[in-house]
Amino acid sequence: MVDELDILTKKLEDRNIKIETVLQKLDNFKIATPSWGYSEGGTRFHVFRDKFAARDLME
């Protein structure tokens, strides 16, 4: 049975593109995401508090 990766590999080979090169570039690809997406954050209109976040320095 032919899977989608095999189909893509064949299409790329037809265009003289090596799948190994594409996979290596994808492996090295980095995406920066905003830190506010991972903990307390908000906008100028509202603060979104994490109920599990430390409430003071001791926690």
Image (tube, rainbow, N blue to C red):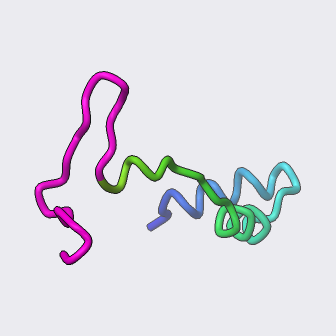
Q: Residue furthest bottom?
A: 58
Left or right, 43 with reference to 18:
left
Q: Nearer the viewer, residue 9 or 36?
A: 36
Q: Main secondary structure of the magenta part?
A: loop
On screen, residue 4 versus residue 51, left or right, reads: right
Residue 20 figure quarter: bottom right
Q: Which residue lies at the image location 67% right of the left edge and 60% below the top edge? A: 29
Out of 6 and 26, give the one closest to the viewer: 26
Position of residue 38 relative to residue 20, above or below, is above
Q: Residue furthest right?
A: 16
Nearer the observer, 52 or 9: 52
In the rendered view, would you say 41 is above or below 35? above
As drawn, is 32 to the left or to the right of 9? Answer: left
Could you tell me residue 44's position as x and y percent? 36, 25
Q: Quadrant of the C terminus?
A: bottom left
| Residue at screen point 88% across, 56% down | 16
**Residue 8: x %, y % from top left:** 63, 54
Task: Report the span colored magenta.
Answer: 40-59
- The residue positioned 84% from the left and 49% from the top of the image is 15
Between 35 and 44, the residue placed more toward the observer is: 44
Tell whether position 45 is magenta: yes
Task: Determine whether, in the image, residue 31 is placed left or right of residue 25.
Answer: left
- Position of the N terminus, as image quadrant, is bottom left
Residue sitting at 17 percent across and 62 percent down?
55
Q: Position of residue 33 (x, y in %)?
A: 52, 50
**Furthest-front residue in this view:** 57
Q: Position of residue 17 (x, y in %)?
A: 83, 57
Is 20 contained in the magenta span? no
Q: Residue furthest left?
A: 51
